[in-house]
Amino acid sequence: MNRPWQIWLTLAGCFAVALCALGYLTNKALELDRAELAARQQAALEENVRLALWRMDTAASAIVAQESARPWSDYLASLAPPGAAGGNAPRSATVASPLLINPPPEVLLHFELLRSGTVTSPQVADEQSIRRVGAPVSEQELAERNKKLANLTTAVTQANLWEMAPNPAPAPVVPLVPTEQGQVAAADAPAQQELQQRARGDNEFQARSQIVQNNSITNFERMNARLGGADTQLTPMAPIWLGDRLLLVRRFTVRGQERLQGCWLNWTLIRGQLLEQIRDLLPTADLGPALKSGEGSRLLATLPVELKIPATATLQPIGWTPTQLALLAAWIAMVTVSVALVLLMRGILALSERRAAFVSAVTHELRTPLTTFRMYTEMLLGGMVPQASRDKYLETLHTEADRLTHLVENVLAYARLEGGRGPLALEQVSVGQLLDAAQQRLTERATQANLQFNVEADSAARGAEVRTNPLAVEQILFNLVDNACKYARTEASGEIRLAANATNGHARLSVSDSGPGIPALQLGRLFQPFHKSAHEAADTAAGVGLGLALSRRLARQMGGDLHYRPADGSGACFELTLPTAS
């Protein structure tokens, strides 16, 4: 696996496996978290439902208890002339029923139903009777009561209310058997939770029903005790839905005559009052008729009413859960590690490529001077070189030696910088001193390439003081001049210019040539170390592509910088910036 694409493909496969595994675990963890969240919210909802049902049963039981405790005589035919139905009432015909004068707001109409099908109401009377007893009832109110009585009469006639009415004796409460723990444990977790909630709801309904039944039995016994006598019998009030009408009905038997007494409840008003009682617990809940018997988890024990809760009320967002935060942290860590591994692998591969390119380029660079050394020394030792040409051969050997020395110096200097050794020792010198110290060496290098070397610096620039390392500056300038000699030597009238100026607290030394310049495609990797391969080193000028990278790092270590800019006209220009001493 020596090729980069093989390494990247293997790394991508590892990332794909890790992402699939983490994605699977994330999905399962979120499913469990959602199930746990739903269970917690459902438990909280059931607790609110339990409290709401207790509140509503408490409020509704007061209404039922009030009507259950009402004397049977209040239901007799009200203010009817003697001889009419119900006229056997043991009260004066001129005494108004309390229901006629002050009916409760929770009741639309009180009524009495005889076996003959006649429906009467103590709240309905003619105007003459009302004036006789002095009851404060307006004509409009009396007309509305007559409409209600007619409406109720029609409904009672169409339905068999006698079959729906309660039996003479109250039905005993059958206790519910709680769900056995062993049976629940045999089911899975969701079914176990559902069974437990159902059992708790049934037990709650049983407790509320028991309290309501006890109150009804107590009222029933009190009323029978007040009646006193074997020829009278009274059953507790029982709620009944007659269409969309909610009624409270009881059987009353006196002297063998059986009748039904009850009231038509104002369900709209009662519903609003009950919902207001639980507004803080279940703001979106509603109440509706419970026409069929079902589970007691949502039923009122006092009235045949079902508590209805929208499905959206069972799942309310509660923000980030610990599981979601942990998964988010895991994904962030996964992405961070992935990016770090990609960057690390990219750096390793780039370093490997640079090392391979460096070895290849250095091998090519060393082959030519070593071949020259071996061939020329063999010729000199063998006496094959005429005396007149010996100096020329020795000069060539000296040039190749300088070339190798420059290459080795650059490699060693870059190795020192890469090794993180201490910063360069800085001293305060003038720009003129830097130019004078490097001018001879730079001129010799330009002369070897048959190029002219000119220094352009006015007195202000030469007198500028900079704090730098003179040897490092000389090495940078020599690298720049050496590159200019390599790439501009083919020009017929080549020239290298070293210009100096000082402005805005910086001294600038620029080296420009009259060569062909640098192609735009190479500008992106111009300052990268070892960017030349063996093929590029063979096709271009000599070098391993290390001089510019080393020069920029030396310049930045001294507090300056090295930049490339196109020269005026043709050629290339590199500008070294150094901070002044001030």
Image: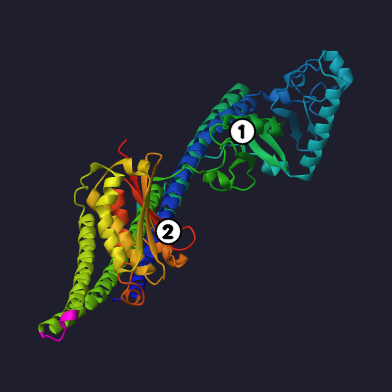
Amino acid of disc 1: Leu
The C terminus sits in image quarter: top left
Q: Nearer the viewer, residue 105 or 572?
A: 572
Q: Which numbered mark, 1 or 2, is in the foreground of this view?
A: 2
Identify the element where label 1 is drawn: helix
Rate crowding at label 2 as few (under 14), some (14 to 19) or many (20 or more) other CA atoms within 10 Å. Answer: few
Tell me where residue 467 sits by quadrant.
top left
Residue 458 location (% of width, % of height) = 38, 45
In-image side of 580 versus 89 (left or right):
left
Residue 109 location (% of width, % of height) = 75, 29
Colour scheme: rainbow
The N terminus sits in image quarter: bottom left
The answer to whether residue 23 is visible is: yes
Residue that label 1 marks: 275
Residue 27: numbered disc:
2
Residue 234 location (% of width, % of height) = 63, 31
Please tell me which of labels 1 and 2 falls first in the chain. 2
Tell me where residue 376 sits by quadrant.
bottom left
Farthest-out residue, left: 381
Amino acid of disc 2: Asn
Dominant secondary structure (helix, strand or loop) of the stretch shown in magenta: loop
Q: Is residue 75 above or below residue 32?
A: above
Q: Residue at x 41, y 71 (%)?
A: 492
Q: Is residue 8 above or below residue 209?
A: below
Identify the element where label 2 is drawn: helix
Reply yes or no: does residue 384 show up in magenta. yes
The answer to whether residue 344 is visible is: no
